[in-house]
Amino acid sequence: MLDMANYRPLEEQYRVLKEEIAKFSDRLKDRNYAIALTRVDAASVDDVDERIEEFIKSLDKKVDKKDNIYKFLDKYPMHIQDIDDYDSAEPFFIAPISSVVRLNIDPFKYALLEVVNHVKESQED
């Protein structure tokens, strides 16, 4: 989870988080993951879309801003991998959320459940 209302750029927060996870556990650093951009409701409205798009592009990912199967609000840019072509070395999704105003909380849970189920199924094969 990266904090949209933090003064540090998302790219820096992501880099620091990845470094801290790697220091903590080799097993954890290689696990499947998604990125939630938290406190989007507290971020500056003027540049929130631009900051999200720049972050997604900094990871060489495609920016989506359309209808999606999890029903993330299409008001904000996001990135979602196709579950059938899932690359576990990359984030399954990058999406803004807000627990205060419950923005994208249900879609967040549905998307996480799908990737967990997908990983379980692939381990059973």
Image (cartoon, rainbow, N blue to C red):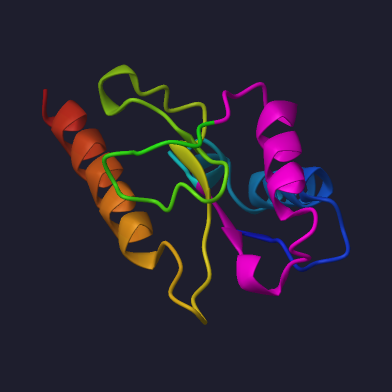
Q: Is residue 36 magenta?
A: yes
Q: Is residue 21 left or right of residue 46?
A: left
Please report the residue visible at 35 percent of the width from the left and 23 percent of the height from the top: 86
Q: Is residue 44 left or right of residue 67?
A: right
- Of 59 and 67, the residue lying toward us: 67
Q: Is residue 39 visible?
A: no
Look at the picture and state if 53 lies above or below 122: below
- Of 93 and 47, the residue lying toward us: 47
Quarter of the image where the N terminus is located? bottom right
Among all residues in the image, which is located at the extreme bottom?
A: 100
Question: Residue 62, how many percent across, how many down?
Answer: 57, 23
Please report the residue visible at 69 percent of the width from the left and 47 percent of the height from the top: 49
Question: Residue 76, how many percent across, how many down?
Answer: 56, 49
Q: Is residue 119 left or right of residue 44?
A: left
Look at the picture and state if 109 lies above or below 95: below
Question: Residue 35, how many percent across, how many down?
Answer: 54, 48
Please report the residue visible at 76 percent of the width from the left and 68 percent of the height from the top: 5
Q: How many marks?
A: 0
Q: Which residues are magenta?
A: 35-63
